[in-house]
Image: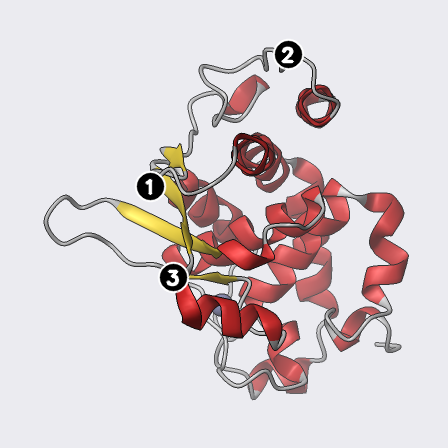
Amino acid sequence: MKRSLAAAGLLAMLSGGVPVAIAGTGPLCGTGRNTAICFASVDRGGALSPDERAKLAAAAPVAIDIVSSRQFAAELAAFYAALPPRWVKGNRYWRGFDPVEAPKAIRAAFAGLHIDTRGGARARKSAAFGGNLAYEGSTDKRTGERFIMLNRYRLDRPLGGLVSTYVHEASHKGGYSHRAGQTRDQKCEPPYVMAQLARKLAEPDKWANFAASKNACRFWREAR
Ligand SMILES: [Zn+2]
């Protein structure tokens, strides 16, 4: 499996060994059929420790490969098909959603995306109170560069969490949105659901626990 190659690379890095060369054109690219899709950089500002940087980098090919996989497309289509029709009708973020187009949009958003981090008092406060894991970032008007920003105080998360964050923020770049305000249903809106699916495929053994938590869309645990 393509993904297990990336996982092997991550394990090698975490165990302090020399990173295994991932079969791609670069460490921030997907593998196999996805070698042409590459994040642009991790930690341009050089604010992270080598370990932190390696961990963020290792999640990049995993995110690309997962969103590009048939499994992701199939799970997304199945989730979408099973959404309560009345709920979809009343939800402007799902109305008009195309489960075939969405993974393509995220793949396109990954390409050339910089993974930056944000420190400072606001990020620290947000981290302390369970707030933002990441910020959507913006497009640099001068250079056209696109970036997302991870909260520097919330980097100590497992692979699935980082992959999930990349998918969520890249989905915003791809035009997908959700309501503000951490409502119960926000977790069921497209950026969250696609991020949750990526997490599921990145760490299948942890999925049951996650799906039962309040961080997951309630539809995973409610009979539909
Ligand atoms: Zn968001």
Rounded to the nearest angstrom, the CA distance separating label 1 from label 2 is 24 Å
How busy is the neighbourhood of tag 2: few (under 14 within 10 Å), some, or many (20 plus)? few
Question: Dot 2: what SS?
Answer: loop
Mark closest to the chain's N terminus, 1 or 3: 1
Q: Label 1, on which residue?
A: 45
Cα separation, mark 1 vs mark 3, equals 26 Å
Drawn side of residue 144 relative to residue 32, left or right: left
Quadrant in which the N terminus is drawn: top right
55 above or below 13? below
In the foreground, 92 or 206: 206
Q: Residues within 10 Å of mark 3 (few under 14, many from 20)?
A: few
Residue appearing at x 71%, y 19% in the figure: 12
Q: Nearer the viewer, mark 1 or mark 3?
A: 1
The residue to which callout 2 is attached is 18
Give the residue type at disc 1. Answer: Gly
Residue topped by disc 3: 175
Q: Secondary structure at mark 3?
A: loop
- The x and y percentages for residue 137 are 34, 59
Relative placement, left or right, of 121 versus 147 is: right
Does 173 appear above or below 14? below
Q: Position of residue 41 (x, y in %)?
A: 38, 33
The reply to whether callout 2 and callout 3 are in contact (CB within 8 Å) is no
